[in-house]
Amino acid sequence: MLFAGKFQGSILVRSKIEKGWQWMSAGTKCKQKSPLTIGQNAKKVPMLGFRSLHHVVRAPPPRSTPPTVHQLLRESIQRVRNHVQGSVFKNQSRAKGLWKPSQTLAFGVGAGVALHTGWSKMNRAECKVKANGATRLLEVKKGSDLETNNGEHFWEVLRFLREDVWYLLAAVASAMLAAFINVQIPLLLGDLVQVVSEFTVREHAGNYLDAVTRPALRLISAYGIQAVCTCGYIAILSSVGEQLATRLRTALFTSLLKQDIAFFDIHHTGELVNRLSADVQDFKSSFKLCISQGLRGTTQIAGSVVCMYGLSPKLTGVLVITLPIIVLAGAAIGAVLRKLARDAQEQTSRAMSVADEALANMRTVRAFAMEEQEAALFSQELDRASGLQSRLGFGIGLFQGLTNLALNGLVLSVVYYGGYLLASNEVQAGQLMSFLVASQNVQRSLAAISILFGQAVRGVSAAGRVMEYIKMEPSIPLTGGKCILYHSLYANVEFDGVTFSYPSRPQQTVLKDFSLSCPRGKVIAICGPSGAGKSTVTALMERFYDVTAGSIKVDGIEVTELDPSWLRGRTIGYINQEPTLFATSIRENIRYGDPQATDVEVEEAAKLANAHGFIQDFPSGYDTVLGERGATISGGQKQRIAIARALIKRPSILILDEATSALDAEAERLVQDTINAVSKGRTVLIIAHRLSTIQNADVIAVLSDGRIQEIGSHTELMKRKGMYADLVQRQASHDH
């Protein structure tokens, strides 16, 4: 990222891409490394990348003496660092909670160069942004420090096993018993081989069946016990694994539901659903395999080594010398594979986000004939994911292949050296057979563990991704705070000097010193051009976000002191321009506003919302199942069901966010009649696009550029012939 412009003034961000110096486009892939230097009068200066296409860094006040280059360096770094710590990183980083002030920062949209916290150590870093459809997702890289501590998260996930700890211990005991029996099998087999070998020598001839029966029965019994134990621990672990997956998904989904609305502004639904499904599934599979085969294999290795040492210390020495080398080499390869596994999972999440977005907006895709483009975009993201998965698969395959080669070479060494010891009469035939079988147990166990290693890599990475969101705490709690008794609630709402910027766009102020009174029993309307911040007012009223400055009060109490669940669940009824209905019955959609409501109360709410008539016309009436998002009914019908859903909880404050702007004239008239009927005795805040719907409002506030430009009744504002009158005139001419 380069700055072009004077150091003392505004700095415009540019990015060096394929065709010269151009304005940086979000999503440009780049990897740039260069030290920080000072440039003057439009010289190019490597600097930090920001989300917006330009960013202003203010110069310090004039000094009596000219600053030195070192002073300029220190101050410029400190100013940018303070700005980053205060806004950009906290609000835009996807690695929320992972950054510490002592760490190097490396991020941005497009290319970027990081600044170290110390000016004398201007470290080089890199940043990378990957495409996801039309939206770009911000990645944060800082070596291993900014990566989720997957190892710690893996152990944190295991706390979800507390309820099944006894079942888990039973499974572990069964697995260890099976492993112990498997360790004894080579010894029992060696005894049997020794008996058979003795009958090959004439001087030891006797009753063969009598001699062979006892060791054969012991061996068969061992095989039987091993089979029962294996069946037991696999069955128990399968049950425990499913219970673990259920608890993880429940905890993750519950945590996601608690997150701030700002969290969903920057995270795609497909990514979140992928963590609920694929990541939990990966961890569950890894958990079961690592506990069963991993524990069994480790126990077999330890037991077999002890047995082999008792059989022949010399042959055991060959294994002891070579095994650590294999283990260390595997650990080195594993570090690379873990990072690759996480990258592959994240890219898969991005691909799923593209699919989820397209399927959720299928009508729009179909309306613009974008099926092929969406398929191509999804295929492009899948190709990237497939490439990473292929690299991961190649790495795991290489690891397993090298491991098997080393282990087979180890067995050949044992056979070669064992033959020498047998010829020297240092070991007997039965002992050598037992040692060979035990060494094969070690070889098979190590090979199984090497195969498990790839699964464990995925599992640990998945655990980190799941726990990252489970541990995340919202800045706005769902519950806790004051509640105003219903008979004491007047529902007077006061906006006092509210200033607000969205967390995802902290550099853009949406509301500036916004003040407005909404008394009980009055209808307050807010209108203005698109992008003026009208809908933001309703979002702040619902406390979807906290204000940057100023306050919002209900009956003199700031909303930050009120219980959010009481405010949203019992006090405010919210109806937006495009209400979302669920793919269930009309009755359950209305009851969503009050799950305890009776069927009679549901019908009363529908009558108030002027919805009872058309609902009764459906063959199944209130039990009619709607399509996804209410796609099987008209816009006006959806709005009236949404109004019924809001009214069933008997709200004292009613918010209507452009509730009729998307309707035709007849549907608008019906919905408007409904709104007029239910507004009596309530504090009503209307966000209006069609000004004809608010002419009877008690107060109309005209909002533009985040500020109230005019306020008054329809008659008063028309007499002033200001912005409101101009909006009315333009809309009237457009309608005609």
Image (cartoon, rainbow, N blue to C red):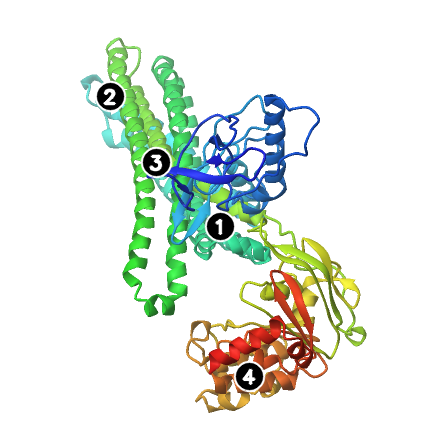
Name the amino acid type tagged 4: Val
Looking at the rendered structure, the secondary structure element under dot 4 is helix
Res. 451 mark: 3
Q: Quadrant of residue 457?
A: top left
x 69%, y 28%: residue: 63
Label 2: which residue?
198
Q: Nearer the viewer, mark 3 or mark 2?
A: 3
235 and 630: which is toward the camera: 630
Q: Give how far apart the Cα atoms at labels 1 and 2 are.
A: 49 Å
Name the amino acid type tagged 1: Val
Looking at the rendered structure, the secondary structure element under dot 1 is helix
Using residue 103 as the reference point, say whether residue 664 is left or right of it.
left
Q: Quadrant of residue 331?
A: top left
Residue 251: horizontal and vertical position, in percent? 56, 54
Label 4: which residue?
671
Res. 240 mark: 1
x 32%, y 22%: residue: 435
